[in-house]
Amino acid sequence: MTTLLSVKDLSIAYKVGSNDVVAVSNSGFDVPKGTIVGLVGESGCGKTTMARALTRVIADNARIAGGEIAFDGQDLAALPEAKMNALRWRDISFIPQSAMNSLDPVYRVEYQIMEVLRDRGGMTRRAARARAAELFEMVGIDKGRLRDFPHQFSGGMRQRAAIALALALNPKLVVADEPVTALDVIIQRQILDQLRTLQRELGLSVIMVTHDISVVAYTCDRTVVMYAGKVVEDCDTATLLNRPLHPYTMGLKNAFPDLKSAGSGVLTPIAGSPPDLADPPDGCRFAARCPFAAELCRSTEPAPLEVEKGHIVACHRASEAAQLRLEASKPQTWEAMA
Amino acid sequence: MPEAAVIRKPRVLSRVFSAVRLPVGDPFAVVGLVIYALFIVTALSAPLIAPYDPTEILYTENYDLASDLLPGEEGHVLGTTSLGRDIFSQIVWGARSALLVGLTAAFMVAFIGSIVGLLSGYFGGWVDALLMRLADVAFGIPFLPFVIVISAFSEPSIWNTVIAMALVLWRDTGRVIRSQVLSLRSRGYVEAARVSGSSDLKIILRHITPNILPLSFLYGSIAIGWAILTEASISFLGFGDPDAISWGFMLQDAFNSQALARQAYHWFIPPGLAIILVVSAGFFISRGYENLLFPKLGR
């Protein structure tokens, strides 16, 4: 499988006052062509910053401090703005978090889709109109609704319209920032199914940013787990959920309900909160919340290593993972940290 | 394609109607709309409705001065003033100056306020700082004394009110629109337009202005009432244009002629009532629009 996108050693810093807050530091992952890659982690772990950096649409006070984003033979991190702009929407497109705010309430949806097709895609009015109808069919909205205003759409339809907009110019890579977070589970499933179908039919590659393990389990081929601005684990989703190597992933799994196993039904949260990124700790960033942290963990930062084929983890105790998994499945292990 | 043309026509019409969207659901707003309709028709067709020139000094058939006639006497619907002028004709012509002052002032306030709000909110930085400090200054100016000062230093004219309003009252509209723009400019569609290389001007015109227009209209409609009230106050205080017949001028005329002491209610009640009706009608309408614009207020 060829790699479409390869992020290496990427660092992104926000200037806050006179300090640099490094929201993503020396992190990387690969997106093989035609797969859905999930980017998970709790709020503030840098997943949205990372995703936005791929389109280079970052906040005014943020900058890419280092690393490279290899996409299709080009380094996006170093590309001049004009060239980057030519790639946006045509090769890499973005599905924003709140579709509510991504459509302009004063224009009909058709007009907004056609505007993209004509201005960015250079289509004629007639071709754009036909393509807009085709896109609506693709995301499962009746094309009669094209003449509606955004407020006449339900939340799910707006999200579909946002997906249609992202797919308008046949991009190679779609970055979806929490595309289903504001929706109820039934609509979530519909949207995710739609995304998967489209991904298969169009051979798309998708990066899905989410904090919801169940979304990842349902949709993603590969999963990248981030913690406090670092990638801590990266492997295919099935292995990640069944045989996680990083204690954070183990803890994250415990904190979500599992419908299949008849456990106690009690969820075990990970005590504490992520470190302050303005002043990150020396060792492993998860050490303070990790029930298995050793002396080494507090002093030296673990480097991400490919411990098994296609399974990357940044943990000093990755070799003892089988034992740790056993302990991590007991609630007492985590409660002792609280 | 003749078929397409046939389908198109009603669509354009319905578009215009849906764009105007009169707030007919609210009974207050309906009353306001009826009063406004009467007011505008009266103002536009003043020469047809008014039986006399409002400034003409009239005489009776016996060549006496037709002064202080009561309503109905000698065919004067509302009687005459002490100088023998027809009160009804003055009311009708007064509607014209009220409409003129109201509309121009409202336009100025909404226009200047919107531009200030757009620039300030969109560009931020020193543009914002400069414009908002100017707004602070405008907030510090006491409005009525300011109008009086302007009137005192320039030729008496109804335009003094309009100029003073344009110079001072943009502040409220500007502030409100600025805050709206601050929220709009961070919306996804604005960001999308920006990163796909749209110019600032295009973003402002295409995406931001249409979204703040309802607010501009709301503030404009409130300004109509303010302008009419202000013009009346200025005229009543004697700083108005003595040649232009307005409702405020009529009140001042009646006051100076001691109409109250002589119990000439037919003289000063009609202009007072006209002011109250038109101004409150304006507020009723803007209230109706407010319900349309901000349905969450849930009144």
Image (tube, coloured by chain):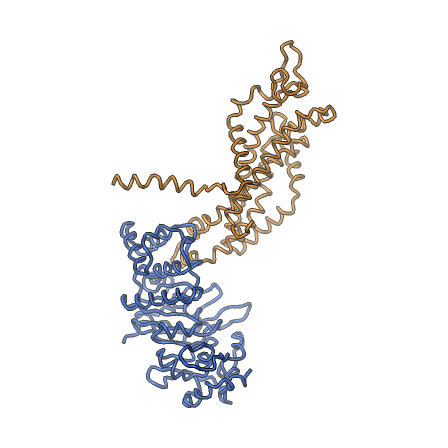
- From what the image shows, is residue B28 above or below residue A265? above
Residue that sits furthest to the front in the current view: A262
The chain drawn in orange is: B
Residue that sits furthest to the top in the current view: B62
Residue that sits furthest to the left in the current view: B1
Q: Quadrant of residue A32?
A: bottom left
- From what the image shows, is residue A202 above or below residue B278? below
Q: Position of residue B114 (x, y in %)?
A: 51, 46
Q: Position of residue A144 (x, y in %)?
A: 32, 52
Q: Position of residue A253 (x, y in %)?
A: 44, 79
The residue under the point 46% across, 78% down is: A252
Q: Quadrant of residue A94?
A: bottom left
Q: Is residue A213 left or right of residue B142?
A: left
The chain drawn in blue is: A
In this view of the protein, can residue A298 be seen by the observer? no
The residue under the point 44% across, 58% down is: A100
